[in-house]
Image (cartoon, helix red, strand yellow):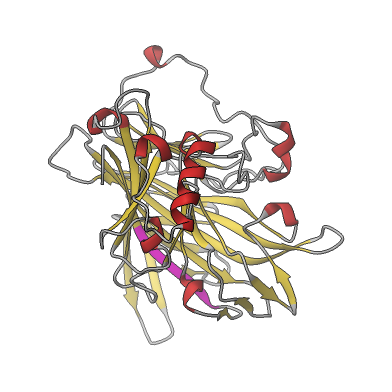
Amino acid sequence: MEITPPGHVPVSLVCVPPSVIVCIGTAMFANAIYHCRLLSVAVLVITCTVDPAPLVAQSAEVNPADAKSVDDDKTPASQRPATVGFHCTQTESALIVSYGDAEVLRYNIVAPKPTDPAHSVYQRSGYIHPLYSPSGKLVSGDFAPDHPHQHGLFAAWTNTSFRGKPVDFWNQGKSAGLVLHDRVIAIDNQQHTASFQVGLNHAAIDEDGNRTVILDDVWTVAVSLADQTDQTAARYVIDFSIAQTNITEHPLTINEYHYGGIGFRGNNDWYTAAGTKALNEQSKSKSKQPAPPIAVTRHQFLTSEGHDRFQGNHSRPDWTSLYGIVQAGDADDQDTALAGIKFRGDPNDLFYPHPVRLHPNKPYFSVSPCVLGTFDINPGDTFRARGSFEIFDGQP
C-alpha cells in the first residue's frame, strides 16, 4: 500500500513474508518501526523510524537484449567467505539464491547468452535458470536444441488476443510477444528463508517491431528447506507466485489452449533422440506398450494420482513431478543418479487443482488454467497464481 501526504514523498509498505519493508521515495528499508493511526475514514497517518541502510535499491535500467555473462563473481569458491543458511545476492545480471556456499538458483535480470549463436533470437530475461538440487545436480534447462524458447522456470501465455490481434508471449520465434525483466522490487534474507520480489513486462509486438506492455507481472519467490529441522538440505522448497496486472485500457483474452501459463523446462540432457523414439512408439500404441525405462527416456513424469505423462496430461492432480538422470551410472541408484522438481498448487487459487500440460516426449510441463477455457484479464484486473516447487534428489 502507498500513501503520499501533500508535499511529502510517498511512503509504501511492501509485504514480503515474513517481514514488512518500508519504502520512502525509491529507497527501501528493513526492520522499520512503524505506527498507524486512523484519524477518520479518509485519513490514515503513518509514522516510522527506519534503519538508514537501504535493504535494496531500485535496479538500474538495463537493456535486456544486451546479453552478458551470468557469472559476475570470478572469485574461486574456495576463496569466498563461508556463509550459512539461505541468502539472496544481486549482481549486475542476476539474483542468486544460495544455501551456504551452494548455489540454488538464479533469476536472470539480463538475458543470458545461448551456447549456439543461432539461438540468439530466443534470448530473454526474466526467468529462473540454473536451478540445482540439494546435491548440486542441474535440474532446469535452457536453450534446448528442440525448443530453445523454453527457459528454466518461466511464465508466459501462448494463445491470447489483444485489440483483435493474436499475441503469443511464449513462442519467441513468432516475434508477436515477449516477456522481459523490468525491475527488482525487494530482497529479504531471513534465518531460514531467502526471498525476492521482481517485476516483469509482458509485451505485444506489432508488425513494425513496436512493443506494447500489456501485463505488469510481479513475482514473489521465497526459498527454504522442506524440513526446517533437517539442516542437511534434503529438499529445497520454492514458494512461487505471480500477479499479472493489465495496465492497458483494453482486455487481454486468454484463449482456450492446450498449454501456456507457468512453464518449466528440465535439464537439456533429459531429451535424446532414442528417448523421443521410444516415447513416440508408446504414444502410437495408445499406452498399450509398457513405458520405456528411464535409462532410455532419461526422464519421467509422475503425478499425485500415479499417472505418467500420457495419463496425466491435462489432468488436475494435487502435485506433478518431473525427474531424470543427472549423472552417468546406474539409474537405479536413486540417491545419486536422479534429481527433479515437484509442483504443488495452492488450494486457495481460483483454478485449483491446476490443470497441467505434460509433453508427450520432451522434459517440460506447464501449469495451464487456459486448458479449462477462455477468460479475460480486464484493464486494472490482476491474474494471480501461486504454488510451490520442491527440488529433490532421487525420486519424488
On screen, residue 37 above or below 146: below
On screen, residue 109 above or below 255: above
Residue 53 as seen in the image, left or right of residue 343: right
Q: Image quarter for residue 201?
A: bottom right
Residue 9 seen in the current view: no
Which is the main secondary structure of the residues drawn in magenta? strand
> Observer-nearest residue: 307 or 42?
307
| Residue 163 screen position, x and y as percent | 74, 79
Residue extending farthest to the right is 208
Q: Image quarter for residue 392?
A: top left
> Observer-nearest residue: 311 or 172?
311
Q: Image quarter for residue 178?
A: bottom right
> Observer-nearest residue: 311 or 65?
311
Residue at 64% x, 72% y: name it. 160
Residue 10 seen in the current view: yes
**Magenta-drawn stretch contains 139:** no
Residue at 45% x, 14% y: name it. 76
Quarter of the image where the N terminus is located:
bottom left
Residue at 64% x, 80% y: name it. 251
> Observer-nearest residue: 247 or 231?
231
| Residue 21 screen position, x and y as percent | 39, 55
| Residue 259 screen position, x and y as percent | 53, 64
On screen, residue 133 above or below 199: above
First to last magenta residue range: 381-387
Residue 154 as seen in the image, left or right of residue 252: left
